[in-house]
Amino acid sequence: MKNEAEAVKPIRSLEDAISRCQALGMRLSRQRRFILELLWQAKKHMTAREIYDCLNQQGKAIGHTSVYQNLEALSSQGIIECIERADGRLYGNVNEAHSHVYCLDTNEIIDVYVELPKELLAHIEQQTGVRIDNYRINFYGTRISPRIAQAEIQAPTECCSQNGSKANSPQTDVSLTR
Ligand SMILES: [Zn+2]
């Protein structure tokens, strides 16, 4: 789904996302712009419901159907990110290949930029015979402390049940994409 999008200018900001819409000839309604702005501000992944609530709280009137239709249109064009989860879909801004940190305490998915050491990439290439152009890593874990969580990301306040003692062995799953 991303391959053809990557041939064009990568989306690295809200402005890029908007110009991608224009380049694709998509109509940029006010509602569509609201959604893009919100996802770029929020820097986290949200459900359609959360997006709807958040926009309406900000006084930006938008209907349920409009939220769903716009999310569908934007994600099908690769302008926003859509993550399928067992309990529903999450949407986020699309930014050059970024990795995800899954917080098992709060159920959040946080974007991070990870650059692997060249030696490691070379090792993987050698092991697989595939030239690595791009990668995304999924990290899983629990909150270290509420303070760090608040400072680093603008996490909603409800998310800091300080219960870091779950025995989750740290795991990463590296998916190699081209
Ligand atoms: Zn993401």
Image: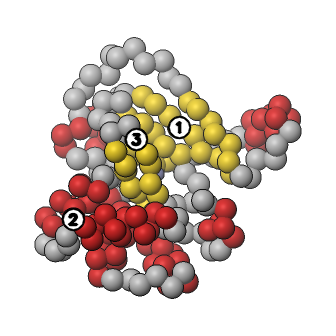
> Which mark identifies residue 85?
3
Labels 1, 2: front one: 2
Callout 1 amino acid: Asn
Could you classify mark 1 by the number of other residues whose Cα lies within 10 Å: few (under 14), some (14-19), or many (20 or more)? some
Q: Position of residue 139 (x, y in %)?
A: 50, 34
Secondary structure beneath label 1: strand
Residue carrying label 1: 138
Callout 3 amino acid: Arg
Identified at 51% across, 68% down, the residue is: 77
Q: Are marks 3 and 2 in contact (CB under 8 Å)?
A: no
Quadrant position of residue 122: top right
Image quadrant occupied by the N terminus:
bottom right
Identified at 34% across, 68% down, the residue is: 69
Q: Is residue 14 above or below residue 88?
A: below
Q: Are marks 1 and 3 in contact (CB under 8 Å)?
A: no
- Of residue 2 and residue 19, the one placed in the foreground of this image is 2
Coloration of the structure image: secondary structure
Quadrant position of residue 167: top left
Q: Relative to 95, is 166 on the left or the right?
A: left
Identified at 58% across, 32% down, the residue is: 173
Measure how far apart labels 3 and 2 are at the Cα level: 20 Å
Q: Is residue 58 visible?
A: no
Secondary structure beneath label 3: strand
Callout 2 amino acid: His
Q: Position of residue 87 (x, y in %)?
A: 33, 39
Residue carrying label 2: 64
